Amino acid sequence: MNRLLIEEYQPKAVIISELGVANNVAHAYKLEPIKTLRMDYPEKSNVRLIEHYKDTQRPWFFTKHWSASRSFTKDQKRDIESYIHESHS
């Protein structure tokens, strides 16, 4: 169903808030890996925030889950938003 929605609406980007599905989705949609964004924070170092891929038309961003993750901080949210904005503008 997602494949049909993407084909129909042609979004400029796809953002999925679940890092755990990145490899499976990348394989299913034949996505090319671009970058893994890891950041250091006072409370924890080397935090994986984003898996960035692309298909032939658009970027795909898999991010740390926004609501279910108790350790999702305002700084991490800001860094994710900044990365997507800078990578997609």
Image (spheres, helix red, strand yellow):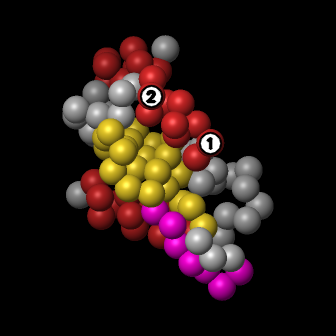
In the displayed structure, 8 sits above or below 75; it is above
Q: Amino acid at mark 1?
A: Gly
Which residue is depicted at the point 51% across and 67% down? Answer: 38
Q: Amino acid at mark 2?
A: His
Residue 39: within the magenta?
yes
Q: Which labelled disc corresponds to residue 27? A: 2
**Image side of residue 9 versus residue 25, left or right:** left
Distance (Cα) linking label 2 and label 1 = 13 Å
Which residue is depicted at the point 68% across and 76% down? Answer: 44
Residue 18: within the magenta?
no
Q: Position of residue 22 (x, y in %)?
A: 52, 39
Can I make out residue 74 in this image? no
The picture quadrant where one finds residue 12 is top left
Q: Earlier in the sequence, mark 2 or mark 1?
A: 1
**Image side of residue 56 versus residue 72, left or right:** left
Decide which of 8, 32 is in the foreground and name it: 32
Please report the bounds of the magenta region as a residue range. 37-43
Which residue is depicted at the point 22% across and 32% down? Answer: 56
Which residue is the extreme one toward the right?
Answer: 70
Which residue is depicted at the point 73% across and 65% down? Answer: 71
On the rendered image, what quadrant is the C terminus found in? Answer: bottom left
Q: Which labelled disc corresponds to residue 20? A: 1
Q: Position of residue 87 (x, y in %)?
A: 29, 58
In the displayed structure, 29 sits above or below 46; it is above
